[in-house]
Amino acid sequence: MTVYLDCAATTPVDPRVGDEVMRFLGKSFGNAGSRTHSVGLRARKALEQARDRVARAAGTRRGDVVFTSGATESNNLATLGLEAAARDSGRHHVVSTRLEHRAVLEPLQELERRGHRVEWVAPQPEGRVTADSILSALRPDTWLVSVMQVNNEIGVRQPIEEIAERLGDHPALFHVDAAQGFGKEPEALRHPRIDLISISGHKLHAPQGIGALVARKRGGKRPQLQPLMWGGGQERGWRPGTHPVALCVGLGLAAKLASEECHERQVRCREFGRQLESALRQLPIHINGDSPHRVDSMVNLSVEGLDARSLIEAWEPFVAISDGAACSSATATCSHVLASLGLSAERMEGAVRLSWSHETPLPDLAGMVQAVQRVQAGAA
């Protein structure tokens, strides 16, 4: 049996979530904007319950949650949607990191094309930026700091709590791309100095195509976002269009379940990772990314003497894995994350990502080890 080990790309939908989504695609199909009859009112009630559930999981309030199509849209709204306010205030400086997902990198590169200056902070060799490096990059005209919570390629946590604490009264807004951490690493996101949080449903056993942006009040004011689309006025006018109620409900239930089962899920993922790495240590592997700060559900590794394609083919009967971030694999370029760690070309060319969930069964670990050993023996 081939075991799916690409949960950092997308997770299977939790059956409980799937059942609820199907209910709202069937009998409870109403438009949440229809307020003149019970079908629409039931949809509105379900939508706001979903908003409450996402808010509780993020340690915030219902009014702070804006539904989007996913973390990519949320990241774009949290960056490009703030540009007008930044220009009005005469500020043109942004601080971010070389580790960010392309859904943050590319909007920030667009801001550079529009005349803003982006300070790209490099990580330490273990794949983690320091709070000192972020804070030292601040200027009086910095209007945004954007640092991801968990890196999507190497699984390393970034020090967002420390950054949030030390930003203090600086006027810059603090944005966190939490696509890989929301519902899995909850405490860090509860810091009130984090102004904007991007959330993706399909990393949390909800369907693809749904996410959220948390936009917290600070000093009684919300971030001055401008919409990227126009027409309809939904979601405070920041994200117009008919609500996909079924998908929103799915995200809400997935967030609720993740909160309730967080500890149990972490324990299962940790034990899975322990057994996986213990078995693979029989091979000449290199772990790419610092283990003490790595989440329990992901590992990026290279096997000496094998490129990624050869390793994936050797393991194809056992596991489905990725040779990098699946959402950027179409570019067929070297990982900017691994390059930022200063890894050798051989390690980067051999890097694969294995990622799992609390429901993932253990693959045939002995078979995986033997498959690599056969390839290495054939190449000798």
Image: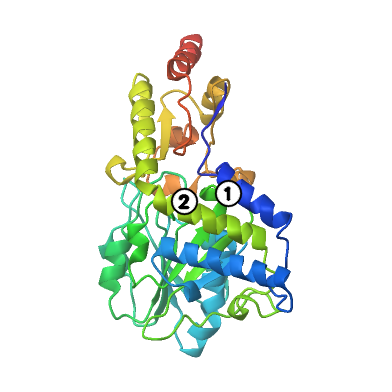
Dot 1 falls on a residue whose secondary structure is: helix
Residue 58 image position (x, y, % from top left): 42, 63
- The residues bearing labels 2 and 1 have C-alpha atoms spaced at a distance of 9 Å
Colouring convention used in this rendered image of the protein: rainbow
> Label 2: which residue?
257
Q: Callout 2: few (<14), some (14-19), or many (20+) C-alpha neighbours within 10 Å?
A: some
Q: Quadrant of residue 274?
A: top left
Say whether marks 2 and 1 touch (CB < 8 Å): yes
Q: Is residue 293 left or right of residue 344?
A: left
Residue positioned 43% across, 75% down in the render? 216
Residue 9 image position (x, y, % from top left): 55, 44
Q: Is residue 169 left or right of residue 252?
A: left
Numbered tag placed on residue 17 in the rendering: 1
Residue 225 seen in the figure? yes
Dot 2 falls on a residue whose secondary structure is: helix
Q: Callout 1: few (<14), some (14-19), or many (20+) C-alpha neighbours within 10 Å?
A: many
Work out whether 355 lies above or below 249. Answer: above
Residue 359 image position (x, y, % from top left): 48, 35
Work out whether 328 lies above or below 173. Answer: above
The amino acid on which the numbered mark 2 sits, given as a three-letter code, is Leu
View extreme (front): residue: 38
Residue positioned 73% across, 61% down in the render? 29
Residue 210 seen in the figure? no
Query: How many numbered marks have been drawn onto this rendered protein structure?
Result: 2
Q: 250 and 80: which one is in front?
A: 250
Residue positioned 73% across, 66% down in the render? 30
The amino acid on which the numbered mark 1 sits, given as a three-letter code, is Val
Q: 178 and 326: which one is in front?
A: 178
| Image quadrant occupied by the N terminus | top right
Q: Quadrant of residue 299?
A: top left
